[in-house]
Image: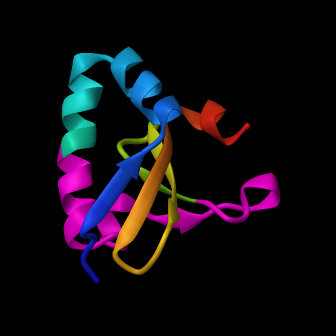
Amino acid sequence: MKITSIKVSSCYKKSFKKLLFRIQRKAILKIKIFKENPFDPRLKTHSLSGKNKECWAFWIDYYYRVKFIFLSNEKVLFLDIGTHEIYK
């Protein structure tokens, strides 16, 4: 399954701009992997629970994640990017 369209929320845009440049670069690399296969093992993609049960997340690195929802099989909306704070 390939991702053909990624939409980003205003919250995601704002959070991305605040990240350190090296984390932004890492995120861009992981997003390329995500587009090819959102369930690539390197991303550790997982569904969330509780109030975020509609959402999914994948790893940028040990501390940083991208929170998103599937709009369809090929389309996603990135909701936020950051540390575990994004789950609150």
Residue pictured at 51% horizontal, 55% vertical: 68
| As drawn, 62 above or below 34 | above
Part of the protein shown in magenta:
29-55
Q: Is residue 82 shown to the viewer in this render?
A: no
In the foreground, 63 or 80: 80
In the foreground, 15 or 45: 15
Quarter of the N terminus within the rendering: bottom left
Residue 31 drawn at (x, y percent): 26, 52
Label count reads 0
Is 74 in the magenta?
no
In the foreground, 11 or 83: 11
Q: Quadrant of residue 75?
A: bottom left
Quarter of the C terminus within the rendering: top right
| As drawn, 43 above or below 78 | below
Q: Residue most toward the right?
A: 50
Q: How is the image coloured?
A: rainbow
Residue pictured at 54% horizontal, 66% vertical: 46
On screen, residue 4 versus residue 88, left or right, reads left
Residue pictured at 72% horizontal, 55% vertical: 52
Q: Is residue 28 shown to the viewer in this render?
A: yes
Residue 53 drawn at (x, y percent): 73, 64
On screen, residue 67 versus residue 62, left or right, reads right
Is 36 in the magenta?
yes
| As drawn, 87 above or below 7 | above
Residue 32 drawn at (x, y percent): 18, 56
Residue pictured at 49% horizontal, 69% vertical: 71
